Amino acid sequence: MNNRHGEKSKERSEYVNLKMNNHSQFYKPIYKLLYIINDFTAGLFFSIGSILFYFDTTKPWVVTLFVMGSFQLMIRPMIKLIHEVRARMYYHKEFDQRHS
């Protein structure tokens, strides 16, 4: 019985990996939208900060915008990670429903 569980687990992993390989980068439009908004705002923060960098009186704003842009760059891989985890959970559940 334990061996059967191990075989099913291996089959389930193979199923999920196959689905993930055939999976488009974004399976839900919300992730694509979040990715675009994040990239746009990061570019905006760095662009405005770069322009304001020419003026001494705006230095605090420059630093703030560069820090905000840096945080936006950290959010990008988090969006990918969340998408990856949720997609894998979906395919695990799909496998279980097909094989129950």
Image (spheres, helix red, strand yellow):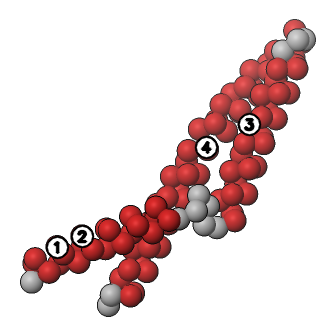
Q: Earlier in the sequence, mark 3 or mark 2?
A: 2
Q: Which residue is mark 2?
A: 10
Q: Tell me the residue at 82%/35% (across/down).
A: 44
Residue closest to the eye, 15 or 57:
15
- Mark 3 to mark 1: distance in Å? 45 Å
Q: CA distance from mark 4 to mark 1?
A: 37 Å
Q: Confirm whether residue 89 shows in the render.
A: no
Where is residue 93? Give x, y as percent: 41, 78
Element at label 2: helix
Q: CA distance from mark 1 to mark 2?
A: 6 Å
Query: Which residue position is annotated with label 3?
Result: 42
Instruction: Check disc 3: other Cα within 10 Å, few if <14, some if 14-19, many if 20+.
Output: many
| In-image side of 85 versus 48 (left or right) | left
* Nearest to viewer (mark 3 / mark 2): 2
Q: Quadrant of the C terminus?
A: bottom left
Q: Is residue 95 left or right of residue 49?
A: left
Residue 23 appears in the figure: yes
Residue ID at (72%, 25%): 66
Q: Which residue is mark 4?
A: 75
Nearer the N terminus, badge 2 or badge 4? 2
Q: Give the answer, above or below, for where 79 lies relative to 92.
A: above
Name the outermost residue toward the top: 56
Looking at the image, residue 51 lies above or below residue 21: above
SS class of the residue under badge 4?
A: helix
Dot 1 falls on a residue whose secondary structure is helix
In which quadrant of the rendered image does the N terminus lie?
Answer: bottom left
Task: Give the residue number, with chain letter if any, for mark 1.
Answer: 6
Mark 1 residue type: Gly
